Amino acid sequence: MSELKKRLSSILESPKHNTEEKLQKVCHLLDQEISYFNWTGFYFKNGDKDELKLGPYVGAETDHIIIPYGKGICGQVAVSNETFVVPDVHQQDNYLSCSIDTKAEIVVPIFKEGQNIGQIDIDSHKVNPFTDEDRELLEWLCKEVSKIL
């Protein structure tokens, strides 16, 4: 994981790309390097509205461009301000289905100056694939991402 962290840092620190491009490259790298990351994307607070708006992502197209706070796993994280790991999405009452292939999801909030401004959302086609190492990596990544926002 330390090698992956170095590569992610180098993307985020690159002077030749804008923020959107950096986030897109982060999604691509995670998608390429971790086989069970089958949809990787960012959502951000949509202005002053209590909703999230889809940002850069890699994976199947989604209808969930806007997600109201409280709705689905992403919407819950926007309210709870805590990482949410869902080992099996079919066991969740408040799950927004993006793809019939999705079996598990992890969502990690991004904070800037103490405010929850967005999140990284990862779907997997495997049940219970996410490890403590994945969680630690993504929480570290969200802290790093907040520095460029």
Image (spheres, rainbow, N blue to C red):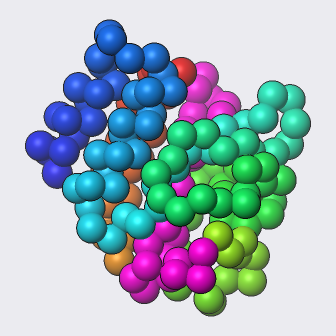
Residue drawn at x 32%, y 51% as measured from the top left: 30
Farthest residue toward the bottom?
91
Q: Is residue 29 above or below residue 117?
A: below
Q: In this view, does 27 lie above or below 75?
A: above
Residue drawn at x 73%, y 50% as measured from the top left: 65
Farthest residue toward the right?
49
Q: Is residue 5 left or right of residue 88?
A: left
Residue drawn at x 44%, y 27% as measured from the top left: 21
Q: Is residue 128 magenta-colored? A: no
Q: Which span is picked out in magenta?
A: 99-127
Residue placed most toward the observer, 110 or 23:
23
Residue placed most toward the observer, 24 or 7:
24
Determine which quarter of the picture holds residue 62. bottom right
Residue 28, position in %: x, y? 35, 46
Determine which quarter of the picture holds residue 95. bottom right
Residue drawn at x 72%, y 42% as measured from the top left: 53
Determine which quarter of the picture holds residue 90. bottom right
Residue 139, position in %: x, y? 41, 47
Q: Is the magenta stretch mostly helix, strand or loop?
A: strand
Q: Is residue 8 left or right of residue 44?
A: left
Q: Is residue 110 magenta-colored? A: yes
Q: Is residue 145 left or right of residue 119?
A: left
Residue 19, position in %: x, y? 48, 22
Q: How many badges with numbers are in the image?
A: 0
Residue 2, position in %: x, y? 14, 44
